[in-house]
Amino acid sequence: MRLLLVRHGQTTSNVGQLLDTAFPGADLDELGRRQAAALVHRLAEARIDAIAVSNLVRTAQTAAPVAAHRSLTPVVFPGLREISAGEDEMSPLWQRYVATLVGWADDPTLRLPGGESGLEFLARYDEAIDEIAALGHDHVMVVSHGAAIRTWAGHRVPGLAGTLGHGGVPN
């Protein structure tokens, strides 16, 4: 199975640099809606057999234009949601969040207060990817979240660790 990992479009939380990781999350803003619409053209040559989204509304909103254009129905996989910010939810102080995620390279048991550990995050994201694979599609567009995509890919794609960075707010 080939995965096309897509980060959701911009939200007001992104603009405000807020750690928005909890359900249901912020809607796309005007720029985010334009980014989602632009995916139809940007992915015109990509084979997409199915679309998977997290349970945060911004991923379904990002996937909607491509889904409509291709007559596909996105399937929700809650395990694709963003990495929990725990007690730092909706905080503009995201440096501790990023430091924790980066620290998972050496100690995946680290966690933010009220958040999940690297082991817990990877287990739930792996489970979602396994559920997607079990559907039997060859090419799946996965609409998820910045920190989740970078962290999961950095831990699971050989040769990718350390190349994705964590610049900016990771939601």
Image: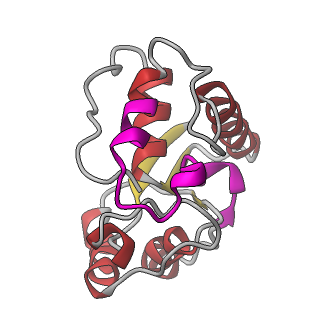
Viewport quadrant of the N terminus: top right
Figure check: 12 above or below 130: below
Residue 17, percent from left and from top: 30, 64
Protein image colouring: secondary structure
Residue toward you, 154 or 107: 107
Q: Is residue 75 left or right of residue 94?
A: right
Corner quadrant of residue 171: bottom left
Figure check: 44 above or below 138: below
Residue toward you, 63 or 138: 63
Which residue is depicted at the point 57% across and 24% down? Answer: 110
Q: In this view, does 152 lie to the left or right of 72?
A: left
Is residue 160 in the magenta section?
no
Residue toward you, 6 or 57: 57
Residue toward you, 7 or 104: 104
Is residue 86 in the magenta section?
yes
Figure check: 41 above or below 114: below
Which residue is depicted at the point 41% across and 26% down? Answer: 154
Residue 82, percent from left and from top: 54, 52
Which residue is depicted at the point 48% across and 64% down? Answer: 20
Corner quadrant of residue 134: top right
Range covered by the magenta-colored residues = 75-100
Figure check: 141 above or below 20: above
Residue 11, percent from left and from top: 37, 75
Q: In this view, does 75 lie to the left or right of 50?
A: right
Q: How many marks?
A: 0
Corner quadrant of residue 35: bottom left
Q: In this view, does 138 lie to the left or right of 70?
A: right
